[in-house]
């Protein structure tokens, strides 16, 4: 069986090259079987920069991102967006829309949102925009005119969970039994409106570019939440670039399977995990940043920078979750040892890789966390030791003694933490103390006007590798 798995791994380049025979009209038909990908950071998707972390010396968030949306005054709504959108529809940027209830883009329709449009989510109806399989959202703002999804409450009274969020559903592969699942978040599955998954790796659900999503995120019940932006089996034909999620009541970004790639993502002051991967997600990410608010954490669980699972029940199911990440910066809730005791106890790991998740993680910076890197469960660790996962050239800093590197689970793959630390050392990773972390970035812990660019002489200014 191990030899078979190796053969499938070598044969798969984008995760769809395995095949099986099935009956069709009495004849044998060939249907692709999703398999694990073997992509690396050498892929042409990645810009080959020399620095580690999301920013060098230039702030690519300037002009379009908003780090203090609580104080922003938006104009009153003048139109309503509700119900089902079943034909191609283009919004009017001169109007301010009230998003009311669950709004479905379906029947193959395309919703086009012009640059500069403001859409305010209604709290009472848990307003949520759902782009169903086969339909598209074309939300392409500009740096000067970003598209804004925000709370309909007045400045000063907004909070995480004021409305639902954005859910995009596609036909790319996942590892859900049968290949098709129903997205979480209370989505009505009549007419398969909540369905996601298939065999089209390059499925196209449209564009999200220069988009801000503020105060979303509703937890209906444990493990059934609406995130800031949810990607359900979204394919590589979809463009995701320059997207900010702020003050989200759950995860800022969560991927359930799929292959979609993304650059320039920002997560600010969310409640649960900043970046969450599940069910065989195999996309690529570069230039992503997150900042945690010490007083905002998930009281029903734990709040992590990265949380990644393959499958909740079958840890080695295929395709394996295997995000390929470079140049990520996640700033935890602990600005210094002196404030550690005041940080919400539910804040935990910079990275939590578990339940068989694989990964390629390089050239990234994780500072200000209680706990550092946790590799949990046998299958997760085995992927590091057999080389199908790689963690390389990253910087970690955390505060709790003996919790900077953790091996956990009922069957951990590493017999001791020292073995995992040895692995990390041989792969060019650096584990530093508070003094070292303070010399990396210009002003990363400021909650309303952060600066994530590199300080002069920063250790993160060089050493990135793309292999």
Image (cartoon, rainbow, N blue to C red):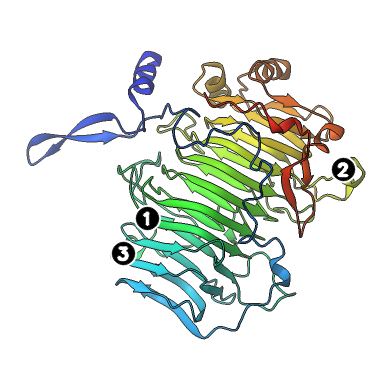
Residue displayed at 75% across by 30% down = 459
Image coordinates of residue 425 in percent, x first then y, are: 69, 18
Query: Is 139 above or below relative to 259?
Result: below
Disc 3 to disc 1, C-alpha distance: 18 Å
Q: Which mark is residue 205?
A: 1
Graded by Cα atoms within 10 Å as few (under 14), some (14 to 19) or many (20 or more), the crowding at tag 2 reads: some
Residue visible at 60% across and 20% down? Answer: 413
Residue 278 seen in the figure: yes
Q: Relative to 207, say whether 307 is above or below.
A: above
Of residues 236 and 130, the one nearer the viewer is: 236
Residue in the image at 40% along x and 49% along y: 234
Disc 1 element: loop
Residue 174, image quadrant: top left
Q: Earlier in the sequence, mark 1 or mark 2?
A: 1
Tags 1 and 2 touching, CB below 8 Å: no
Q: Quadrant of residue 156?
A: bottom right
Which residue is identified by label 3? 191
Crowding around mark 1 (Cα neighbors within 10 Å: few <14, some 14 to 19, many 20+) is many
Question: Which circle, 3 or 2, is nearer the viewer?
Answer: 2
């Amino acid at each position: 069986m191990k030899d078979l798995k190796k053969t499938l791994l070598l044969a798969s380049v984008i995760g769809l090259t395995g095949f099986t025979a099935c009956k069709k009209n009495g004849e044998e038909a060939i249907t692709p079987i999703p398999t694990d990908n073997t992509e690396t950071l050498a892929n042409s998707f990645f810009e080959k920069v020399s620095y580690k972390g999301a920013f060098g010396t230039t702030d690519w968030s300037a002009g379009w991102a908003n780090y203090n949306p609580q104080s922003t005054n938006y104009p009153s709504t003048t139109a309503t967006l509700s119900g089902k959108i079943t034909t191609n529809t283009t919004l009017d940027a001169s109007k301010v829309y009230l998003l009311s209830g669950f709004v479905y883009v379906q029947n193959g329709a395309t919703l086009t949102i012009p640059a500069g449009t403001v859409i305010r989510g209604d709290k009472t109806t848990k307003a949520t925009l759902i782009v169903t399989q086969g339909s598209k959202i074309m939300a392409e703002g500009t740096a000067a005119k970003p598209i804004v999804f925000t709370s309909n409450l007045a400045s000063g009274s907004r909070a995480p969970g004021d409305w639902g969020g954005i859910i995009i559903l596609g036909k790319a592969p996942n590892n859900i039994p049968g290949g098709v699942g129903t997205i979480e978040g209370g989505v009505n599955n009549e007419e398969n409106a909540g369905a996601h998954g298939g065999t089209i790796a390059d499925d196209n659900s449209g564009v999200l570019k220069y988009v801000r999503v503020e105060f979303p995120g509703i937890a209906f019940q444990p493990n059934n939440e609406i995130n800031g932006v949810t990607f359900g089996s979204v394919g590589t034909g979809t463009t995701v670039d320059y997207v900010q999620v702020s003050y989200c009541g759950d995860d800022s970004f969560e991927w359930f399977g799929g292959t979609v790639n993304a650059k320039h993502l920002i997560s600010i002051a969310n409640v649960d995990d900043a970046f969450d991967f599940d069910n065989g997600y195999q996309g690529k990410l570069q230039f992503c940043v997150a900042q945690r608010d010490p007083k905002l954490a998930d009281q029903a669980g734990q709040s992590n920078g990265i949380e990644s699972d393959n499958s909740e029940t079958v840890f080695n199911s295929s395709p394996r979750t295997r995000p390929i990440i470079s140049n990520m910066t996640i700033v935890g809730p602990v600005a210094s040892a002196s404030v550690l005791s005041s940080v919400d106890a539910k804040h935990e790991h910079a990275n939590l890789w578990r339940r068989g998740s694989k990964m390629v993680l390089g050239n990234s910076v994780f500072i200000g966390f209680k706990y550092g890197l946790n590799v949990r469960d046998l299958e997760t660790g085995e992927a590091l030791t057999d080389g199908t996962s790689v963690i390389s050239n990253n910087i970690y800093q955390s505060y709790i003694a003996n919790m900077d590197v953790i091996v956990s689970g009922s069957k951990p793959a590493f017999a001791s933490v020292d073995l995992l630390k040895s692995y990390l050392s041989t792969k060019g990773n650096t584990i530093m103390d508070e003094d070292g972390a303070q010399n990396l970035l210009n002003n990363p812990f400021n909650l309303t006007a952060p600066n994530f660019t590199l300080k002069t002489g920063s250790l993160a200014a060089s050493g990135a590798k793309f292999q």
